[in-house]
Amino acid sequence: MPVIPQATGVHARSRRRLSASSLVTWERCKRDWFLTRRLGIRVPMHPEMLLGHIVEEAATAIWMERAQPIMQSGVTRWVESESKGEMEVDSLQLLNDWLRTLMRPMVDEMLRQLAENWSNCLWKAEGRAHTDVKREKLNSMVKNAIKLQIAEATECLEANGGPHLEAFRAGGDPFGTIAPCWGGDTHWQAEGEPCTWWEAWEIARPWAKDPRITAAQRLFHPDGWAAGELDVAHRWRGTTHIVDIKANRGHGRDHSGVAFQLRFYQWLWHETRPHPAKPVNRVEEGEVSEIKSWHLADGFVHTADMISDLKAETERLFDVQTKMAQVSFDDFNLEGEETSTDGKLGCAVCHGLQTCDYPRGGQEQPLHSLIPDVEIQRAGPPFGTIADLPSRVTVKGSIHGHWGPMPNHHGDAIIGAAITAGGKTSVIEEMGVGQFPDLHEHAGDCILQNVAPGQWRGMIRLYLDHDSRILPPSEEVEADRLGLIPTRANISGMVISRGQNSGINARGKPWSMSTAHIWDGTGLTEVVAFGRGRSESFDNLVVGDRVRFMAAEIGWREGTPQLRIDPRNTRLSVESAPPESDSS
């Protein structure tokens, strides 16, 4: 990895942290960003949405092959396969020919992974199937992945190995973060000899996401407010070429979105070079000199314009991230009326409950409604409305027991303390990194104003963000009693989005989560079940189900309310969606 990342997994992902994909969505449509990025609403899965990761892994697996004088035709290290005979390989052209013998086993594996991933999808687009992706399309992608990297190696050979030839000969890959490789015998020449085709292939091999590593391989900004996971970095020239791999056609496309993405990677690469956790190189990798996308469906290469003033870009992106962090429901009109474009969530193309960013076509595509236009009959007591979920409270008490920075349950390093009032004590903490950095400057009797109530592991917890204030005890304000602040909620509504995730955390332990976004006509909220909270009833929810939750825990995620399933106390009842409404 170019930079040793922070702890990975769902608990380390911040919806306020700037990323390439969130930036692209923000630049195109802030409404879509709010719904899909901040609130986490998902859309039905299309097979093409699963294809990108599979294609990237397959391309990297091809580039990881290390040539030998005699190679087994059709045998790839990526997946078990049978030999079709021996081939002599003594040039880049013959290497190209041998790599193309790997197409059948590699495409077989790509189709297998696609079918497996599709079967595990919770919410599939109506009328779509993994079989919609044809072998011929994947054949073209493998061919173009080979062709484009052979072209890199040819250019390296013509440049006599580039400026790092002797460093490679002296000790192998001279970069602290080496390019992933399957291994095998090496054939480096003596110092001063001309570069060989074999050396050119080895030297031109890029850094790419290693398919053998299951954890995310992200670059993290040293200050933590931005992160990204780029696909490819060619470093053999003495400068860096950043490449984003696309599993689509490039001819005739609008490349403005990928240009935003590539410039973000250029900026993030520059920002992370002095990162203290970055492995040390034996050579200078140099600045980024080109940013481009490789479209493997047709072999098209798009080269984007680069950022000329990186310092100004840092200021701009930090301003964007700050605006993202401050967006709330008040900036998003759920009633379907157009919001003004005065810095709120206005958009020249879409308004109200619709968004113009799905599919990725702007005005050329119909608007897509992430929130269904359906009449929902609200349940009576003891069920409340989502709009009336407890959002902000004011508490008087004594602040003590300061702690942090320490990771919270989302993996963000935050600071916290405790507050005691009327014999009751609650933990208070920042809602996210840097959300209330002045907390430790306050101690003793104070007033916490406009803080978010919640619950964690059976205990009330209060969260502070940019909208919270700590006032002196002399201020005349109406306060809530700490012991009477609600920490559980009963809600009913319709499931409008489903999601799930799982993995291995930084401590090597497995984790899993399942989510459902619920809409009741007044508002929406995310309900999440972690680990043991994932009951069969919850995991089997489909979009269109009418649900009722009793005693769900009130929590917060990135400035917006979130309900959590307590496996001991939360109760769920489901009225299944009619067959015609079930798009799973």
Image (cartoon, rainbow, N blue to C red):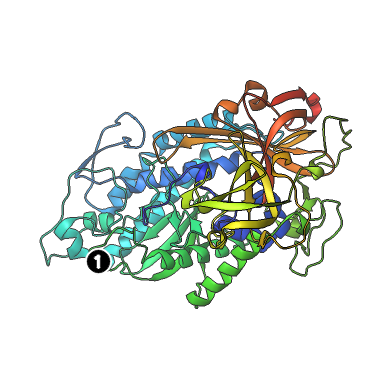
Foreground residue among 114 and 392? 392
Q: Quadrant of residue 571?
A: top right
| Other residues around mark 1 within 10 Å, as few (<14) / some (14–19) / many (≥20) | some
Instruction: Choose between 307 and 155: the one closer to the eye.
Output: 307
Q: Secondary structure at mark 1?
A: loop
Compared across the picture, whether 213 is left or right of 188 comes to right
Q: Is residue 240 visible?
A: yes
Q: Quadrant of residue 207?
A: bottom left
Residue drawn at 51 percent across, 46 percent down = 408
Q: Is residue 430 visible?
A: no
Name which quarter of the figure residue 100 lies in.
top left
Could you tell me residue 425's position as x and y percent? 61, 43
Q: Amino acid at mark 1?
A: Val
Q: Is residue 319 left or right of residue 208?
A: right
Q: Is residue 144 above or below residue 44?
A: below
At x 24%, y 69%, the residue is 163
Q: Is residue 94 left or right of residue 399?
A: left
For image coordinates 71% across by 33% down, the residue present is 127
Instruction: Please identify the quadrant where the C terminus is shown.
Output: top right
Which residue was labeled with disc 1? 283
Residue 533 placement (x, y as % from top left): 60, 27
